[in-house]
Amino acid sequence: MNYRHAYHVGNIGDVLKHAVLARLILHFQKKDKAFRILDTHAGIGRYDLGSEETLKTGEWQQGIGKVLAADLSPRAREILAPWLDVVRAENPDGTLRIYPGSPLLARQMMRPQDRLTLTELHPADFKTLSDLFAGDHQVKTIHLDAWLAMGGFLPPKEKRGFVIIDPPFEKTDEFEQIAKAVIKGWSKWAGGTFAIWYPLKDRRAINRMHQDFKDAGIRDVLQLELRIARSAQDTAMMGSGMTLINPPFTLGDEMRDLLPELCEILRNTPDAGWSVEQIIPE
């Protein structure tokens, strides 16, 4: 599966990923002390929904497009507000033309004391990303392989924060690479939070990754899933999951409140579904 961000921006996977990302940031802001976010596969940061890549798929219409058009319950509006406020701020005339990727969402939510490290390996994407944040002293952009970043930049000097991992899934061993990098990162920063996004296409690979975490002694692992239909390795992506190590204690309950409503908004078939599960206890 090729998951270069520009082709899939704003889709059903981004709905889950960015809703969770915003909640993570809010959690870390409950204390005045600074924290750092490491985004290992940053992409370009800001996306034009009229670009050639985005127009080729139009996936945002089944994701953020549906969410913005929905009549949300008060609870869902409360949980989604940090993310959707940033999306609306990028589109002040009310017409959705720009979508903020994870780096821009994080940057727009950060306080003056917080810091953001972005790594991106694709040369053209890195150039766009570095131009976007040029001169911003709170953001560091680095042209580097994500797995090297996991080994070299942890723990951060702030000692607080989280890593968001969202690889392109271009390689057949991507889940093995994630497991190795996360275990190495966790061994250096056992108190850090790690948030891993992935498509729901290869259940065996997902389960193996979780078993690797358990075998390494990692504790407190939460799994979130949201799908609009069932998918497999030979079908289009119809859902995604996130695995979180050391998640905020409030996140599970927030997602239990939110995901059923998102599932109804986004569903394509009766096979749509969601789950929130503590797969490894504290």
Image (cartoon, grey):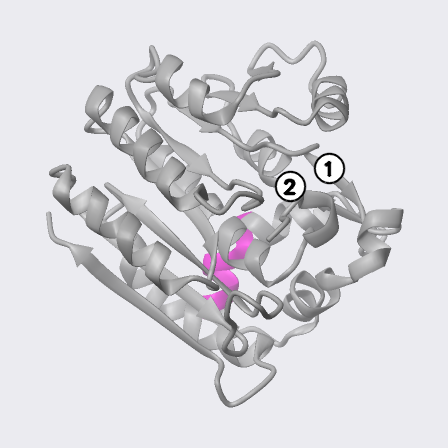
In the rendered image, the residue lying farthest to the front is 172
Do callouts 2 and 1 mark residues in contact (Cβ within 8 Å)? Answer: yes
C-alpha distance separating marks 2 and 1: 6 Å
What residue sits 20% from the left and 24% below the top?
187
Magenta-tinted stretch = 75-82
Q: Position of residue 276 (x, y in %)?
A: 30, 65
Q: Circle 1: is it few (<14), some (14-19), or many (20+) Cα within 10 Å?
A: many
Q: The residue tagged with tag 1: helix, strand or loop?
A: strand
The tag on residue 35 is none
- Prevailing SS of the magenta stretch: helix
Q: Where is residue 192 in the image (x, y as percent from the top left)?
A: 27, 29
Q: Does the magenta stretch include residue 281?
A: no
Per the image, the residue denoted by label 2 is: 101
Judge left or right: residue 30 versus residue 13: left
In front: 65, or 123?
123
Kind of residue sitting beneath label 2: Gly
In front: 150, or 102?
150
Q: Does the magenta stretch include residue 80?
A: yes
Find residue 164 and report its image quarter: top left
What residue sits 50% from the left and 30% below the top?
39
Q: Can residue 35 be seen in this view?
A: yes
Judge left or right: residue 229 versus residue 93: left
The tag on residue 46 is 1
- In the image, is residue 132 above or below residue 229? above
Judge left or right: residue 39 versus residue 223: right
